[in-house]
Structures are given as structure tokens and as C-alpha cells.
Image (cartoon, rainbow, N blue to C red):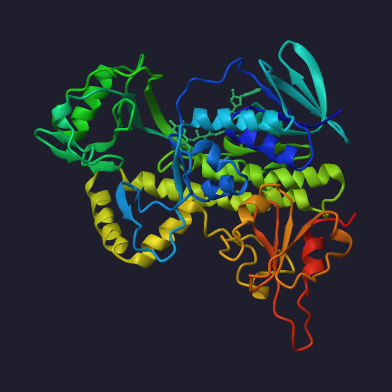
């Protein structure tokens, strides 16, 4: 019997495959497409996921040689420029890289770790038993697995077959058109901005709201520029076309912008999307079936939060599912996947819905924006938004080792200047005890956790495999030893061998 079948070789299914393999479980990935999809979706990664990939040694596979992850000095929120350069602690890391490249990298990494990816395998049915789930496939023999993970996208068959409800809202009044184009050289300013006669300046890599809709102009270096226009109440049918895109841009700007076809080698985007869904599965688990990524939640792509959410779902689920299969999961561990990650999805749904309102035309929205713009002058508001967009504000319930026992408990482990090796240490995906004293006793959990002497640290930390702090030591004294609470914290997550 296979330990885990993952339905879907999208980014999230592949990330989960890597995490399971790191933890010693060999999943089987089933993908209905025979070749990777040419569809262009994400243009980049935004938020904690960039640092998480770095902690697994995967950032360097995507970034330019020698590049190190760093926060972006400016971003966007609801078509407002979000100036972050003056924040004392800017957590909003970004990495511009096309989704296809991310998927290719993750597939390569999964194969390196011994994962089998079977393309042309479409999941069509499932039957759950007490100890296994039988996965039915189109035109092939069924496969039996201990667990099935549906990473099969927003229209997830696994979710539907498991009768997991997908409540939320569908809005169908907006139409978003986007395409790679060319424009006359004299229309592009020195900073990449578009200068449109009769309108003015369209800044690069920002959302520009007018009283008629939204424009985004993205002159990617070394490729054709991508332009998109969002309108409300402008129905369309048939194939998306350059003429249609040009007309839409003209209506939003109130001025003609001569757009030509792209001149580079491609692949090129020309698409039209209607409305949007914001939906979250009401359960992430039904028996031996779990949902991951877009199968568990869909929301507007505004600001690009999808992969920050989904890839970190995968990192959260990977070690828990592996522990369950290898017999060292504490009771209820697998259920914390939903209790930890569904609230994060709800925060993403909240801010993407809020942004979707802020970009709409209309006088009442303009009034709301005026107020919002005043609030954005305050650096505390911008810090709040940066924390929200990045996911740096996540704090998980760590049970008895609650936040009262140490300010880092429940939070993502920050970079530790006294431990420059942290990145290499976390790349194994194993839990770590970072111990400045070098004498803390892991007891019966010693085979499961790597103890790392960390003389430069001023506090001991227990890191879960997903880099969240599960316990923080306090100095010994007043009847307390430095390791107080460590074994309770370990027992919250792991059954001692
Ligand atoms: C236009 C657009 C722009 C976006 N921009 C960004 C961005 O800039 N940043 C960002 O972070 N996110 C962005 N997103 C969101 C991001 O693309 C998704 O969140 C991400 O693709 C979800 O990954 P996934 O692995 O969960 O699902 P998917 O990528 O949908 O992958 C699911 C896989 O499952 C396969 N599959 C489906 N059914 C079956 C079956 N029955 N059996 C076997 N295999 C099956 C599919 O073929 C597919 O390969 C964007 C999305 C869109 C649409």
C-alpha cells in the first residue's frame, strides 16, 4: 500500500511531496495532465513563503545567483502604493518568478528526493475504508493508499467526492482582461511608466484605479509587457482578444492607448476572467482524505497571496502527516493542520475581499479610499498591512507552551544573527532544539529532534519542522530549571518513540 497519494502536481501538491519525502515518507503524485500546463498564473511569491523556501534551501534554486532574500520597500494594497521602506520590521519578502518555474523546480526537487510523479493519471473516484483509501483513476487500475491529499485545484474532484462543503461567495460582475502586448517606445518613460496622451502617467508594477476600473502595467525586464484592465458590468463572450483588451484599457483610462501584439518569443497570455470566488472548505480533512492549496480555499489573486498561503499549508501538513504515518504523532496532531491553517485562509479571504472593494469605481468607494489613504500615512497601519499580507502576524496555539511562556512561542522563528547556520539546519525539515547551554535533555524524544548547541543565543528554542517556535526556554532561577516545560512542549506534538 502507498503511504500518501497526492492528487495534483501543481505547486502545492509538489511542495507537499517534497516535505513528505524530507520526513522519510514516499508519496505518489498523480497528475491528470500529461505535460506541465503552459498557463501563466503567478508572477511571483509574496510573504513568509519566500523565507520558508530559503529555510529549505529552495530560494537559491529560483533566485538569481548570489541573491539573498530581502523585504521589498514598496508593495500594493487595494490599488494604493504601500510604502514600507521606513518600517522598523518589514516582513514583506518577495521573489518575482513565474509559477511555471516554481513548479518545475519543485518537481525536480521532489524527484531528487525519490518521489514518483505519474502524469496522465486522473483521479475520478475514491472509497474510504478504516485503514486505507482506494483512489480510482480514469482508465487505470485503482490505487490503495493510507492517505489521499487533494491538491487538485479550486475545482477539486477530491473535495467534491469527499462531500466537503465549499461555502463562500461568488461575484460575477467584474471582468478582468490581461495580455502581453507591445507599445511604441516613446510612450514608455525612463522608470518604465506608461505616458498616455489624454490621460497621463500609468506607473509600472502598480494598480491604478480610475472612476471606470483598474489598470495594471507590468513591463517585465527581458520580456513583453503585461497589461491588465478590470471593469465592472462589461459582459463579453468569445475568445479573449487584443482588440477587446485595447478597448477595455481605453474605457478605463478614458483615452486611447495603441497596443500592439507582443514581439518576444512567448509563451504569451491573452485571457479574460469573470468575477471571482472567495470560498473556504468547511473541513480540511474527512477521514483519510485531506485538502491542500486551492482545493481548500480560493480567493481573488489581488496582491498574489495564493502561493504564500498554499505552499505554507503544504509545509504545515507535511511533517504532521509524516509523523502520523511513522507512528510518532501526538494524538490529534493531524487535526491541527485545519485548526492552524483555516484561520490563515480566512485572513487571506478577508484582505483580498477588502482590496476587491477598494479597487471598485464609484463615489462611495472614492470616499472610502480617501479615508484609507489618510490612515496609510501612519507607519503603524502600514506595518499592520505588511504583517497581514506576509503572514508574519500568524501565531499558532502551542498548547501548554503558550505565548505567556515566551514572546516567540507560536511565532515563525526569526532569523537569528547568533546562529547564521539556521538556514542549513532547517533544510533537513527536522525539529530542532537550539540550546545555548548545550545541556538541555530531550529525554525520550531525543531520536526525533536534532539538538543544536547554540552558544550565542540568549534563549533556548524548540522549532517545529515548519520553523514555528514550539517552546522558548527561560533562564534558570527561583526554583525553575532552564528546561522547564520542554518535555510538555515536545509531548504536544510528538509521541515519544
Ligand atoms: C491569473 C492568476 C494569477 C495568479 N497570480 C498569483 C500570484 O502572482 N502569486 C500567487 O501566489 N498566486 C497567484 N495565483 C494563484 C495561484 O496560481 C494558485 O493559488 C496556485 O496555482 C494553486 O496551486 P495548487 O497546487 O493548489 O492548484 P493548481 O495550481 O490548480 O494545481 C492543481 C493540479 O491538479 C491537477 N488536477 C486537477 N484535477 C485532477 C484530478 N482529478 N486528478 C489528478 N490531477 C488533477 C491539475 O491539472 C493541476 O496540475 C494566481 C492565479 C491566477 C488564476
* Side of 175 relative to 325 (left or right): left
Regarding residue 154, the answer to whether it shows in the image is no
In the rendered image, the quadrant that contains the C terminus is: bottom right
Regarding residue 427, the answer to whether it shows in the image is yes
Closer to the camera in the image, 109 or 309: 109
Question: x, y percentage for residue 396?
Answer: 64, 60
Question: x, y percentage for residue 53?
Answer: 57, 44
Residue at the extreme top: 139
Q: What is the total number of numbered labels drawn onto the structure image?
A: 0
* Side of 217 relative to 320 (left or right): left
Residue at the extreme bottom: 478
Question: x, y percentage for residue 431?
Answer: 74, 55
* Side of 356 relative to 434 (left or right): left
User: What residue sits 73% from the left and 41% below the top?
Assistant: 22
User: What residue sits 47% from the left and 56% below the top?
Assistant: 388
Up the image or down, 405 lies above or below 327; here it is: below
In the rendered image, the quadrant that contains the N terminus is: top right
Closer to the camera in the image, 165 or 487: 487
Residue at the extreme left: 198
Up the image or down, 464 lies above or below 116; here it is: below
Question: x, y percentage for residue 336?
Answer: 71, 52
| Res. 173 image quadrant | top left
Up the image or down, 436 lies above or below 93; here it is: below
User: What residue sits 70% from the left and 80% below the top?
Assistant: 475
**In what quadrant does ligand 1 lie?**
top right
Amino acid at each position: 500500500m502507498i503511504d500518501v497519494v497526492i492528487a495534483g502536481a501543481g505547486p502545492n501538491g509538489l511542495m507537499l511531496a517534497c516535505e513528505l519525502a524530507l520526513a522519510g515518507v514516499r508519496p505518489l503524485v498523480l497528475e491528470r495532465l500529461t505535460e506541465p500546463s503552459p498557463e501563466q498564473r503567478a508572477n511571483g511569491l509574496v510573504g513568509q513563503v519566500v523565507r520558508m523556501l530559503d529555510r529549505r534551501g529552495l530560494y537559491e534554486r529560483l533566485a538569481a545567483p548570489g541573491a539573498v532574500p530581502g523585504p521589498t520597500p514598496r508593495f500594493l494594497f487595494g490599488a494604493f502604493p504601500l510604502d514600507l521602506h521606513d518600517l522598523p520590521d518589514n516582513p514583506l519578502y518577495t521573489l518575482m518568478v513565474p509559477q511555471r518555474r516554481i513548479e518545475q523546480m519543485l518537481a525536480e526537487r521532489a524527484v531528487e528526493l525519490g518521489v514518483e510523479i505519474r502524469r496522465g493519471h486522473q483521479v475520478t473516484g475514491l472509497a474510504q475504508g478504516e485503514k486505507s483509501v482506494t483512489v480510482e483513476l480514469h482508465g487505470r487500475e485503482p490505487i490503495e493508499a493510507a492517505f489521499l491529499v487533494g491538491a487538485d485545484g479550486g475545482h477539486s474532484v477530491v473535495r467534491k467526492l469527499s462531500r466537503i462543503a465549499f461555502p463562500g461567495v461568488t461575484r460575477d460582475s467584474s471582468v478582468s482582461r490581461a495580455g502581453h502586448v507591445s507599445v511604441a517606445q516613446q510612450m514608455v518613460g525612463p522608470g518604465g511608466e506608461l505616458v498616455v496622451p489624454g490621460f497621463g502617467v500609468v506607473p509600472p508594477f502598480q494598480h491604478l484605479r480610475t472612476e471606470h476600473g483598474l489598470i495594471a502595467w507590468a513591463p517585465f525586464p527581458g520580456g513583453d509587457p503585461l497589461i491588465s484592465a478590470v471593469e465592472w458590468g462589461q459582459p463579453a463572450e468569445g475568445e479573449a482578444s487584443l482588440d477587446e483588451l485595447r478597448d477595455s484599457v481605453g474605457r478605463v483610462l478614458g483615452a486611447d492607448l495603441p497596443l500592439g501584439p507582443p514581439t518576444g518569443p512567448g509563451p504569451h497570455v491573452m485571457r479574460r476572467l469573470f468575477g471571482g470566488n472567495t470560498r473556504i472548505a468547511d473541513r480540511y480533512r474527512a477521514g483519510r482524505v485531506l485538502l491542500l492549496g486551492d482545493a481548500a480555499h480560493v480567493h481573488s489573486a489581488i496582491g498574489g497571496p495564493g502561493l504564500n498561503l498554499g505552499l505554507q499549508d503544504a509545509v504545515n501538513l507535511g511533517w504532521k502527516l509524516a509523523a502520523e504515518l511513522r507512528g510518532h504523532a501526538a494524538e490529534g496532531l493531524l487535526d491541527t493542520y485545519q485548526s492552524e491553517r483555516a484561520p490563515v485562509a480566512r485572513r487571506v479571504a478577508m484582505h483580498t475581499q477588502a482590496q476587491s472593494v477598494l479597487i471598485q469605481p464609484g463615489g462611495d468607494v472614492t470616499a472610502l479610499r480617501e479615508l484609507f489613504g489618510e490612515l496609510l500615512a501612519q507607519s503603524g497601519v502600514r506595518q499592520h498591512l505588511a504583517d497581514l499580507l506576509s503572514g508574519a502576524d500568524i501565531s499558532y496555539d502551542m498548547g501548554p507552551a503558550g505565548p505567556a511562556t515566551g514572546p516567540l512561542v507560536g511565532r515563525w522563528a526569526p532569523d537569528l544573527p547568533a546562529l547564521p547556520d539556521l538556514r542549513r539546519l532547517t533544510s533537513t525539515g527536522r525539529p530542532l532544539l537550539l540550546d545555548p547551554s548545550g545541556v538541555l535533555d530531550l529525554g525520550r524524544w531525543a531520536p526525533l529532534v536534532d539538538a543544536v548547541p547554540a552558544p550565542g543565543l540568549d534563549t533556548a528554542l524548540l522549532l517545529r519542522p515548519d520553523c514555528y517556535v514550539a517552546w522558548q526556554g527561560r533562564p534558570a532561577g527561583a526554583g525553575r530549571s532552564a528546561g522547564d516545560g520542554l518535555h510538555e512542549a515536545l509531548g504536544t506534538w510528538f509521541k515519544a518513540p
